[in-house]
Image: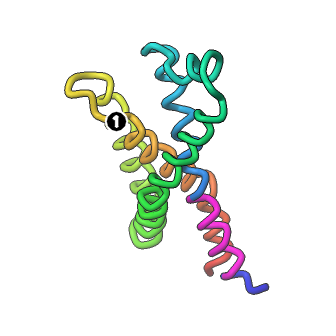
Amino acid sequence: MSRKIIYSIATVLLSLLLYPVALAMVIVADTLLGQAEFLNELFFGSRRELIINVLRDWASALPLSILLWFSVRGLSRYFPTRRVHALVISAGLLATVFSLFPPFLPMIFGALLFWAGILNLCFHTLWQRGNP
């Protein structure tokens, strides 16, 4: 297989990881700061319905996750990578912090932006080696 095809497949697969990683961050924040609704549903509710709801949410967040991931990848390809990482990670953290105060915005958007920056930071050298 061509190296570009492998990197394209890796790019799409990493975009699929954005929502579960961001959801884990939201669950931890909800457990520490909120009423632990996810854990209550996990331990005392129907696990089958919980899995169906998480998969349904993942499917609905998938277009946004893929668009966000390719936007971050495109920015880091055409602009200085360190600045893109700093901008995206700090914007994600700010959006996550702003979701804790009124008007309570959904935390998942900030978490998606934050983790898109972190995953891009971790795997950027992979794409640099593939694209001379």
Q: Position of residue 70 (x, y in %)?
A: 46, 66
> Viewer-proximal residue, 50 or 19?
50
Judged by its main secondary structure, the magenta piece is helix
Q: Which residues are magenta?
A: 5-15
Q: Quadrant of residue 44?
A: top right
Q: Is residue 1 above or below residue 36?
A: below
Q: Is residue 11 above or below residue 59?
A: below
Q: Please, which residue is most extreme toward the bottom here?
A: 2
Please give the count of numbered marks on the rendered protein: 1
Amino acid of disc 1: Pro
> Viewer-proximal residue, 57 or 28?
57
Q: Position of residue 99 (x, y in %)?
A: 31, 29
| Quadrant where the image shows the C terminus | bottom right
| SS under mark 1 | loop
> Viewer-proximal residue, 15 or 77?
15
Q: Position of residue 98 (x, y in %)?
A: 28, 30
Q: Label 1: which residue?
A: 106
User: Which residue lies at the image location 61% right of the left edge and 70% below the top edge?
Assistant: 128
| Quadrant where the image shows the N terminus | bottom right
User: Which residue lies at the image location 42% right of the left edge and 47% below the top edge?
Assistant: 113
Q: Residues within 10 Å of mark 1 (few under 14, many from 20)?
A: some
> Viewer-proximal residue, 106 or 80?
106
User: Which residue lies at the image location 47% right of the left edge and 21% below the top edge?
Assistant: 30
Image-based side of 44 in relation to 1, left or right: left
Q: Please, which residue is most extreme toward the left here?
A: 103
Q: Is 56 contained in the magenta span?
A: no
User: Which residue lies at the image location 45% right of the left edge and 53% below the top edge?
Assistant: 60
Q: Quadrant of residue 47?
A: top right
Colour mapping used in the image: rainbow
Q: Position of residue 53 (x, y in %)?
A: 53, 40
